[in-house]
Amino acid sequence: MSNIIEVKNLKKQFGDFVAVDDISFEVKTGEIFAFLGPNGAGKSTTIKMLTTLLHPTSGNIELNGSNPVNNPNAVRHSFGIVFQDPSLDDELTAWENLEFHGVLYNVEKKLRRKRIEELMNFVELWDRKDNLVKEFSGGMKRRLEIARGLLHHPKVLFLDEPTLGLDPQTRNHMWAYLQELNKSEGITVFFTTHYMEEAEKIAQRIAIIDHGKIIATGTSEELKAQTQTASLEEAFLKLTGNVIREEEASATDKLRAHRQWRGGGKR
């Protein structure tokens, strides 16, 4: 199985602070891959470099055969992303949010309309297509964001803490949708989460980052065996410790990054 993401000796430095420190890893095509770490570990910074929001200080990234620095447009067309913070336009309908996204990605009109109907049925929102998004619950908005991220047939779907704040029923439904898409369309899923049981249940392989360095990679079973623990949460705590961490980026930073991405990735 080939790799759809390859990261080699990646580093990101802000002044004297090294946020990502010489990391290397790969994600296989069609894999469900979890990228875990405490707050401030370097997860968000790494994802921003993978998705063209930040330029690396050094190192190399290949996503679907393209480099995010040298060929950002090709990379952007290769992935979809669901941000941790809400990113839909509340004053538009569900349909209008997806239509706008499809136009931005130059999805041909006939194909776009067909894909919107297909995805909205898939996430069980077709009957609410003409409702304003501000009327939606948190779970409905998350499902719509997933549909939007998949609209242009991306090879990779990035999910930054996609189930944060969702009830268990909605979380289970969301992952059922994504696992079905992973099987039916072969889409690669790259996600972060603080729910260790979610990563243990869903991820086929896991990388753990702390203090900017990858400290462990493997399946859940391999990480548990390595740390001689009974659960992924116990393994995670044994590897990263019990000290409470500060947030890596504020909500304002994340919103600014999202706006930059939608506006063409200005940095």
Image: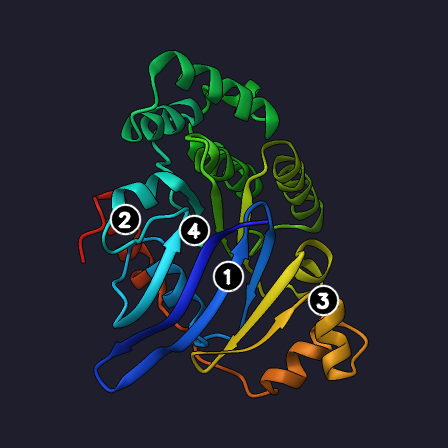
The quarter of the picture where residue 195 lies is: bottom right
Question: What is the number of the mark on residue 197?
Answer: none
Closer to the camera in the image, 56 or 134? 56
Q: Are marks 2 and 1 in contact (CB under 8 Å)?
A: no
Q: Residues within 10 Å of mark 3 (few under 14, many from 20)?
A: many
Q: Of discs 3 and 4, which sits in the foreground?
A: 3
1 vs 4, front mark: 1
The residue that appears at 51% across and 39% down in the rendered structure is 146
In space, the residues marked 2 and 3 are separated at their CA atoms by: 32 Å
Residue for badge 1: 26
In terms of sequence position, does the residue under pointer 1 or pointer 3 come before the other?
Answer: 1
Question: Which residue is denoted by mark 4 in the rendering?
Answer: 83
- Describe residue 14's horizontal placement relative to residue 177 as left or right: left
Q: Which residue is mark 3?
A: 220
Could you tell me the amino acid type at mark 1?
Answer: Glu
Q: Give the amino acid type for the residue marked by disc 2 in the picture.
A: Trp
Residue in the foreground of this view, choosing between 85 and 81: 81
Task: Find disc 2 in the rendering and name its residue.
Answer: 261
Question: Where does the image place residue 180, in percent across and percent down from the top left?
Answer: 67, 36
Q: CA distance from mark 1 to mark 3?
A: 17 Å
Which is more foreground, mark 2 or mark 1?
1
Mark 3 or mark 4: whose residue is earlier in sequence: 4
